[in-house]
Amino acid sequence: MKHRGKNVRTIDENSALTRLAASISAWQKDVPETIDRLAASAIEAITSEPRTLERRIEVVATEVLTLADRFAGAGIVSVHPSVVARSRSLLWWVSRENDGRSEPTPLDADLTELGTYQSGLEEIEWYRVPSATGRSHMTGPFVDYMCTDQFAFTFTSPLVVSGEFFGVAGIDMTVQSLERSVESILEELNENAILLANGDLVAISLDPQYATGSKLKPHQLEQCVITEMAGTSLSVALPH
Amino acid sequence: MDDRRTDSSVTAAIYAPIGDKALVPRIRQRLEDAIATGVLAPGDRLPGESILASRFRVSLVTVREALQQLRATDLLHTRQGRGGGSFVAADSRHIQSLLDNRIRSLSRSEINDFAVYYRAITDAVLNTIAQMGLEQNLTGIRDAFMRAVPEDGAAARSVQGGLDLRLAGEAQSVRLVHEQIRIQNEFGALLWMGLDDPDLRRSVFDHHETMLDEMISGGTRSAIEAREAAVNISLRWLLSRRNEAQRQERENN
């Protein structure tokens, strides 16, 4: 391995970082539009015919999941009384393997053992953060026990109807799909490169001592040069 | 292939029965334990057969067979028509004898082995959370745990099950969660049977509070010790109940 001085980047490294940023952008490029579509059809249903909410979300979610296999789940979640009065809180569809083909399946939290013990949905990060900040948020990576039993990111945006917060619309993307897009570029960058989410959470680590979903401690972060991937919640950490 | 290798003690474990054949007794046992420990109360309606089949992830035939056996022992009864279904029928004396039978049938080594398995999983969960630096994620679990004030044993067992599963979830390991669910289904109702006793409940839950506080402040070892103390209290209760039940049986014979 070539010795490199601290914080000095070679041209190769810069080019790899540019390609990494481009791959990550490509991986999540349809995310805002897709969530907007889910949100738009939810808002339309809530304001005109609330009884059609579940049916409408099913149509959009099914389409989303069929179009792009990077999307592992899609839907809306609302604990707003006017929604809960007419439908379930969790209107979420996930891709499930069935005879080798993936098929959109409604998620029934009651049917997953963990669902039984799940605390209020509004406490979960993918609901809580958009609710508190009014902004879109990427949660994870975390193991999605309620859906796919895989490491996933959940992207959620607030559902706002006439200025009032109604819940979130969102999609799930697997860490595996991100791995496929960026692993070879990470290898070029550094044999111990780490892709981090929301600052310190490990998304992909080439160094096997860091598990996906674990948190890097401040002293571990200090041993790395961190480059944020513009327009995303991800950054890459390269050990000195 | 060398035949001796297929007979070694290591490979024997690989070829041990998977247990699919035993699905009916296992479902029956799970429902019996739930009725015995009050998780399912007299008069409670069970979900429909097809929902049960989907929850247990077994065939409809298997569910029907298990329900049939429970009807035969008068633990369930069926009402037809609108609002019908399978209902928990047991009266309190029937439940008490069910519970006594279940406890009496346990061997000490069986209980101890379950306890070893339970500790292995729960210790691994706490160690993994600490290794992954996710201790701060437990504050939400602690808040929810502190808010729950169970009024009886069944409610307390539900809080206990929720705590164990949410902790396993925080370890970010699918396999640990599945193991936790499995041991909870097989042994949870029995291990935590002592939570019926309000004093025992208080001391067990005090230990859990200590465990959560220690985890959040980085004291994994003390957290594991607190967890251990809670399990030991419950195990002692279970073993003494078992000894009592066996003594009574000897006197009756």
Image: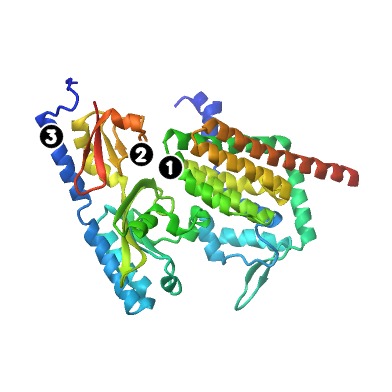
Residue A213 locus on image (x, y percent) = 37, 41
**At 44% across and 27% down in the image, what residue appears?**
B1
Residue A5 locus on image (x, y percent) = 17, 22
Circle on res. A122: none
Residue under pointer 1: B172
User: Looking at numbered disc 2 in the image, what kind of residue is underneath it?
Assistant: Thr
What chain does mark 1 sit on? B
Neighbour tally class for label 1: few under 14, some 14-19, many 20 plus, Cα within 10 Å: many
Mark positioned earlier in the residue sequence (2 or 3)? 3
Q: Do labels 2 and 1 share a chain?
A: no
* Image quadrant containing the N terminus of chain A: top left
For the residues labelled 1 and 3, the Cα–Cα distance comes to 33 Å
What chain does mark 3 sit on? A
**At 55% across and 48% down in the image, what residue appears?**
B163
Disc 1 on helix, strand or loop?
loop
Residue under pointer 2: A212
What chain does mark 2 sit on? A
Q: Do labels 1 and 3 share a chain?
A: no
Residue under pointer 3: A14
Residue B106, quarter of picture: top right
Q: In this view, does B137 lie to the left or right of A49?
A: right
* Image quadrant containing the C terminus of chain A: top left
For the residues labelled 2 and 3, the Cα–Cα distance comes to 25 Å
Disc 2 on helix, strand or loop?
loop
Disc number lying in front (1 or 3): 3
The answer to whether one can see residue A98 in this image is no
